[in-house]
Amino acid sequence: MADEQFSHDPAALFADIEKWAAAVDRLPATPQPGSDLAVDAEASPVLQVWHSARSAAVGSIDHLQLLKAQLTVANTLHPYALATLGRVAIENAAMYVWLLTPNDSAGRVARRLRLAWQEARDLEELLVIDPKFLKPTQSTVEERKLAITDLVTAIGVERSLVTGRFSWGKIVHSAGDSTRVGGDVIEVLWRIGSGMAHSRDWARNSWLKHEVVSEDGGILVLKMTTNVDQVAAFMWATAQLLHVGDRLAKKRCLAWKTSTPTPPG
């Protein structure tokens, strides 16, 4: 894939990173009374939608800031590590958007519970490896699952919406569909970053620059490198998601109905 189609001004993206960081910092840690997310918190006071959404935004921005530091301070272009950081930045920003997108409270809470269910399954697998990992003060996996299914019944959604297969690809694509560039573009960049993170041949062969260093008996020794435009592509994709997430967060977290007739554009 030619990286030129994703070429963007890194300086503008660097400025955007700090803009998104400041925007998240300005949002309250607790949803304002009367807001959509305050309603969600009443339905699910422990597993709150806003807590997870805000944490996802912070995680995304944290990875973007490290990408920025690598390009501006360290001035180094690690072809694999930077793509991995970009992949996680996109992934977290997608979760931010995905959690806040549904217009109804039950839909948003169901997505939060779906995430909690997957986390319980992750912990269940970890305990098979190390049964002592769970601290005595923590609830068991079965207790967590029971609490989640009780909430599923309380909010009146189908259990399959919460306990069904969890797919990062579908979350990234769904969140990407909320952006002006669409889910296909966002998912492609996320998959490239994922492929680089897992040393997939298709990812490095299609994405990285190749330079033949030597040839011995028909075996080529290649030097694979990246460039600023390729790194900026991951940052650009993340910025598309954070732009939508910022708009949704203001809409859901602030009590517009009690303070302002309509939210700003």
Image (tube, rainbow, N blue to C red):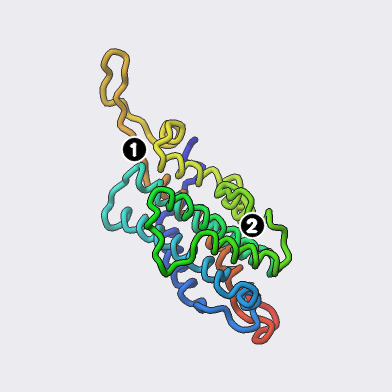
Element at label 2: helix
26 and 9: which is toward the camera: 26
Can you say whether 38 is above or below 2 in the image? below
Element at label 1: strand
Location of the C terminus (image quadrant): bottom right
Taking the image as shown, residue 28 lies to the left or right of residue 100, namely left
The residue tagged 2 is 162
Q: Amino acid at mark 1?
A: Thr
Q: What residue is drawn where x is 65% and y is 86%?
A: 259
Q: What residue is drawn where x is 38% and y is 61%?
A: 65
Taking the image as shown, residue 196 lies to the left or right of residue 103, namely left
Q: CA distance from mark 2 to mark 1?
A: 41 Å
Label 2 Cα crowd, 10 Å radius (few <14 / some 14-19 / many 20+):
many
Q: What residue is drawn where x is 65% and y is 67%?
A: 151
One can see residue 251 in this view: no
The residue tagged 1 is 225
Q: How many marks?
A: 2
Label 1 Cα crowd, 10 Å radius (few <14 / some 14-19 / many 20+):
some
One can see residue 204 in this view: yes
Taking the view exactly as shown, the residue that stands out farthest to the bottom is 259
Quadrant hosting residue 104: bottom right
215 and 2: which is toward the camera: 215
Can you say whether 29 is above or below 216 in the image? below
Residue 182 coordinates in the image, percent (x, y) = 62, 50
Can you say whether 223 is above or below 17 in the image? above
Taking the image as shown, residue 252 lies to the left or right of residue 73, namely right
Q: Amino acid at mark 2?
A: Val
Q: Are marks 2 and 1 in contact (CB under 8 Å)?
A: no
Q: What residue is drawn where x is 32% and y is 46%?
A: 77
Chain-order first, disc 2 or disc 1? 2
Residue 108 coordinates in the image, percent (x, y) = 65, 65
